[in-house]
Every structure is written in C-alpha cells, then in structure tokens.
Image (cartoon, grey):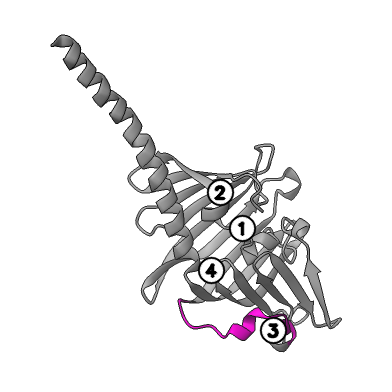
Amino acid sequence: MYRSAFHLFSTLFALLLFLPTSSLATSADEIIKKVEGNLNGESAILHFAMVVTTGRGERTMKMESYSIGVEKSFIKIIYPGKDKGITFLKIDNNMWQYIPRIEKIIKIPASMMLQSWMGSDFTNDDLVKESSLSKDYRTTLIEENGKEYTLNLAPLEHAPVVWGRIVMQVSKQYSLPTTVQYFDEDGIRVRTLEYTDVKKFNDRYYPTAWLMTPLDPDKKDHRTSVKIDYALFNSDLNPNYFTKQALKRYSR
C-alpha cells in the first residue's frame, strides 16, 4: 500500500513539475502574438514626429506610415523641407528608398537592416519591420508580477533577424510592450526602447510615446523619441501604396 501511495505521489509530483513548464511556453507564445497584433493590427496608418537628439543638438522629422501586418510598409517624410518627399517601401524581405532630390530609387540590401534610419537611433529593420517577433524568435516567459510579464526572445536558427536576444516587459493591462532591451550576438545590451503614454484609438489602445536610447559609450547623449499624433488600424488601405511605383507617385 505504501509503495502504491508513493508511486501515486511520485507521478503527481512529476506532473506538477511538467505542467507549469508547458503552460509557460504556451503562455509566452500567446503573449507575444497578442503584443504583435496590438502593435501592428491587420493594417495600420500612423502619423508621427521623430526627434533625434545628439550631443550637437536636436532635429525633428514628421512622417506618415502605412502598413499591412509586418509584410508590407510604406513611409513618407513630410517635414523638414530638405527631406520632404523621401519615401521608403518594404515588401516582404525587400526594401527601397526614393530620394526626390536626385530622383533615384535605391534598393536597401538586407545587410543594411541594422544601419541607422535617417540618422536616428532606430534601424531600418525597426521602421519597416523586416523581422517578425512571433515567427523569427523563440519566446519564453522568464518572470511575472502583478503588472507585467518579462519575455526572453531568442532568434530561431536561420531567421532573418539582426539581434542576438531581446528581453521585453509587457503590460498585462494592455498586452503592449513597456520596455524592450536589445542584445547583440555577444550578449551585450546595446539599446533600450520604452513605450509610454497609452491612448485609445477607436477600439484599440496604443503607446503614443516611444524613446530609444543607445547604450554605446560613444553615444552617451544620444536618444530618439517618437510621438504618435494619429493612428488608424484595420482599415482598407490603397494597395497602390505597396508597389515600387508608389515611391515616386506618393513622394509629391
């Protein structure tokens, strides 16, 4: 009888050890998919201002973006005058830039995804969303409290990503990121992105203030802030935005 009771206890104990691990893995996948859905929607139109701060001063850009999931994205700069009309197009893994001053379309290679976008602390990958968090990373839940989840995102083998690891804090209330830490392939933390000032746009909550801070000692006084002025999700977008012809057509 004691042996049977011991066997039953051992079996139950093994199940208790196994179930949380399985549950955590499932929960992490669900959390990151919900985060990505809340950030991107099926489609999104954003109007925003970006302020780039360095040790030499500040400069402001204003732009509009149109996107479908993480597969297609079109961005147009509308301010300042010297940059007005510069457009960017991303379709799947391809990205182009149009510069009206020289009337030329430039193909941006995958090797440039980690390069600075228009001199800011954001990269080309950030602005055109080449990588997908839910598809290109293995996500695990490493910590949880009453307000937030902490997720670790490790890139899948052969995934087209630029980061060695990402650690993300996610608001339980909104299923939106609050802080994202980016690590290079050597495990060194290189930058931090903070999302704040969540507002409601129709039936969707969205963070309207973003702050990207590089951690490179050579960029001690650098930071880039984004302020969302307008957001519209899941609307029917003109498919003409997502063609190479759009780079020139909507530049004006």
Q: Is residue 182 left or right of residue 6?
A: right
Q: Is residue 175 left or right of residue 119?
A: left
In this view, the residue farthest toward the top is 2
237 part of magenta stretch:
yes
**Quadrant in the picture for residue 82:** bottom right
Tell me where the magenta segment starts and ends, as one range: 233-248
Q: Residue at x 43, y 64 (%)?
A: 198
At label 4, the amino acid type is Gly
Location of residue 212 with respect to 4 vertically, above or below: below
SS state under label 1: loop
Q: Tell me the residue that label 4 is attached to.
A: 69
Q: Tell me the residue that label 1 is attached to.
A: 131
**Quadrant in the picture for residue 241:** bottom right
At label 1, the amino acid type is Ser
Q: Rate crowding at label 3 as few (under 14), some (14 to 19) or many (20 or more) other CA atoms within 10 Å.
A: some
SS state under label 2: strand
C-beta proximity under 8 Å, tags 2 and 1: yes
At label 3, the amino acid type is Ala
Residue 251 got which mark? none
Q: Tell me the residue that label 3 is attached to.
A: 246
Q: Rate crowding at label 4 as few (under 14), some (14 to 19) or many (20 or more) other CA atoms within 10 Å.
A: some
Q: Residue at x 53, y 83 (%)?
A: 237
Q: Rate crowding at label 1 as few (under 14), some (14 to 19) or many (20 or more) other CA atoms within 10 Å.
A: many
Q: Is residue 197 left or right of residue 69?
A: left
